[in-house]
Amino acid sequence: MLFSNIFWPVLPWLGFSPGPIANGAPLRILPLGDSITFGYNEPSGNSYRRDLQCLLSTTGNPVSLIGSIQNGNWDNNESDAFNLHTLDEILTAAVPELTLPRDRKPNIILLHAGTVNLVLGVNVTTAPERLANLVDFVTTHNPDALVVVARVIPNANDTVNALIDEYNAHIPNVVSAAAAAASSHGHGHGGKGKRKVVLAPLMRGVTVERLPDGTHPDEKGYSIMARHWYEAIVRAGREGLVDPAEGEFVDRGKSAVPASGRCEDLVD
């Protein structure tokens, strides 16, 4: 095994030494969402994306981020992150990346979406159903991909935050229902089975004190988000839910790693 002679340190916040996910499978990741995924109002514009890619690269996986939007201070800064887009608008805008040919499809999709609906008061009461519709489209067109769905981070506005709490309360049920839905392609092996949809850990630590503009995290807040995404991917890998990306693959992960080789040094 390529990484068998490397010592992987315990990550204190994870509680164990993760090592390579799915035996070092190449990971083609589509970060999907709105301005929080984009990194709006953060000086670097990296959102959680560079921190996450650094963690994956330094613990043993070839990794490449994909998407139609570029933002951030490193080479592989792609995502499908659409500023001021509601759930329905994210779905419409993301159709090209969600319907790629098989040899270019993502094998991991990270979804954090719904904040714009709640901030702008658009389709608030039906937001969980609209999220479910988005997840259904994602999984229907990417049946072999691991789809990680996050509850959205808080907001400094008390009224908006109450709506976020109500919306978030529905997300575990949305994820459970999506995971139970039969997939025509199954578990990445050609048979019929359940879709690979999991709930990201609650974004604990991304508090209102980490939201300089009341909505978007600072660098530390984004690094905390990255850790939660990483934990979700690690645990999904341990459950056999991560299949290698198909087709030609170029490892762009090292572009996210700082000169020190320490991902924690990405945060000033």
Image (cartoon, grey):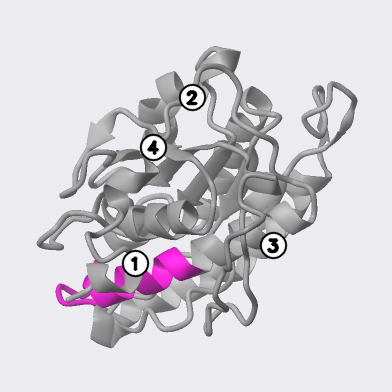
For marks 3 and 2, the one nearer the N-term is 3
Q: Which residue is mark 2?
A: 249
Alpha-carbon neighbours of circle 4 within 10 Å: few (<14), some, or many (≥20)? many
Alpha-carbon neighbours of circle 1 within 10 Å: few (<14), some, or many (≥20)? many
Q: Which residue is depicted at the point 28% across and 76% down?
A: 220
For marks 4 and 2, the one nearer the N-term is 4
Residue 90 — which label?
Answer: 4
- Residue 127 picture location, percent across and down: 50, 52
Residue 263 — which label?
Answer: 1
Residue type at numbered disc 2: Phe
For marks 3 and 1, the one nearer the N-term is 3
Please state which of residues 15 and 42 is positioned toward the viewer in this rendering. Answer: 15
Q: State the CA–CA distance, disc 3 to disc 2.
A: 23 Å
Residue type at numbered disc 1: Cys
Alpha-carbon neighbours of circle 2 within 10 Å: few (<14), some, or many (≥20)? some
Residue type at numbered disc 4: Ile
Q: Of the residues tagged 3 and 1, which is closer to the observer?
A: 1
Q: Is residue 153 above or below residue 25?
A: below
Q: State the CA–CA distance, disc 3 to disc 1.
A: 20 Å
Q: Are marks 3 and 4 in contact (CB under 8 Å)?
A: no
Q: Of the residues tagged 4 and 2, which is closer to the observer?
A: 2
Residue 151 visible to the viewer: no
Residue 219 belongs to the span the image colors magenta: yes
Q: Which residue is mark 3?
A: 235
